[in-house]
Amino acid sequence: LSTDDTEYFPSFDLWDLYNNILYIYRKNGAAPGFGTKTLLGVAAGSVGAFVGTPAEVALIRMTADGRLPVEQRRNYKNVADALIRIVREEGVLKLWRGATPTVGRAMVVNAAQLSTYSQAREMFVGYVPDGITLHFCASMVSGLITTIASMPVDIIKTRIQNAAKGQSQLGVVTSLLKNEGVLSLWKGFLPYYARLGPHTVLTFIFLEQFNAAYFRMT
């Protein structure tokens, strides 16, 4: 990324899809605004989340297994065993159980994380020294906004994917709001941000360094 935001190249990191779409958009001579960046983040997040939903369903079930009563545990041996048994016992479509909130969460996370980082970076130029300091400040803003925006969707997604067999998605959400209240959607905000904040900072700092290294080699 150039400081004056006039160059962008297809990245090879976690945000490949977003960066490539943004690169193509800018290559056509247009300067995307915040709304456009948000939509690009939404598009990238939705595609990636849909593809990754089966693996996430297996992960969430395996993680929650130890907290269930012995008679309700699934006892998957590994991820491959989980995926095979889900298909055999519940049908292939169950691999995408909770795909709607999963895609929704990814859309929210990517829209918030990617677009706010890009926007904050542009806003801080001239006020914050270029380099890691600029990247750190922009990514801290991005991490905070992403945490606020994504926690409700993330909690709902996890509850749905870990729900008992036969329980509807609407039933899971209704039960959550009725029994625990709306503020439960942000329960655990500080530990969530303690995880997502540093993750966002390190991700974008490394991304910027890889981008700078790419430009030096070309």
Image: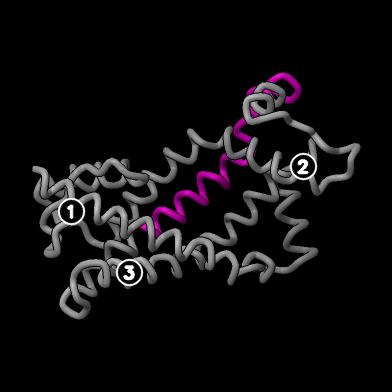
Label 2 – label 3 distance at C-alpha: 37 Å
- According to the picture, the residue beneath numbered tag 1 turns out to be 212
Q: What's under tag 2, amino acid-wise? A: Asp
Quick one: label 3, few (<14), some, or many (20+) residues within 10 Å?
some
Label 2 – label 1 distance at C-alpha: 44 Å
Instruction: Confirm whether the magenta stretch covers residue 97.
Output: yes
Expressed as whole percent of the image width and height from the top left, the position of residue 126 reads 15, 77
Task: Tell me the quarter of the image containing the C terminus.
Answer: top left
Q: Nearer the viewer, residue 100 or 52?
A: 52
Name the residue: 79% across, 45% down. 66
Expressed as whole percent of the image width and height from the top left, the position of residue 211 reads 21, 50
Marked residue nearer the N-terminal end (2 or 3): 2
- Report whether 169 appears left or right of 147: right
Expressed as whole percent of the image width and height from the top left, the position of residue 94 reads 66, 30
Name the residue: 33% across, 58% down. 204
- Report whether 25 appears left or right of 158: left
Tag shown at residue 136? 3
Name the residue: 62% across, 49% down. 157
To which quarter of the image does residue 53 belong? top right
Tag shown at residue 65? 2
The image shows residue 123, relative to residue 48, as above or below, that is below
Quick one: label 2, few (<14), some, or many (20+) residues within 10 Å?
some
The image shows residue 144, relative to residue 173, as above or below, that is below
The image shows residue 76, relative to residue 65, as above or below, that is above
Label 3 – label 1 distance at C-alpha: 16 Å
Q: Nearer the viewer, residue 189 or 33?
A: 189
Q: What's under tag 3, amino acid-wise? A: Phe
Marked residue nearer the N-terminal end (2 or 1): 2
Expressed as whole percent of the image width and height from the top left, the position of residue 109 reads 45, 55
Residue range in magenta is 87-114
Q: Secondary structure at mark 2?
A: helix
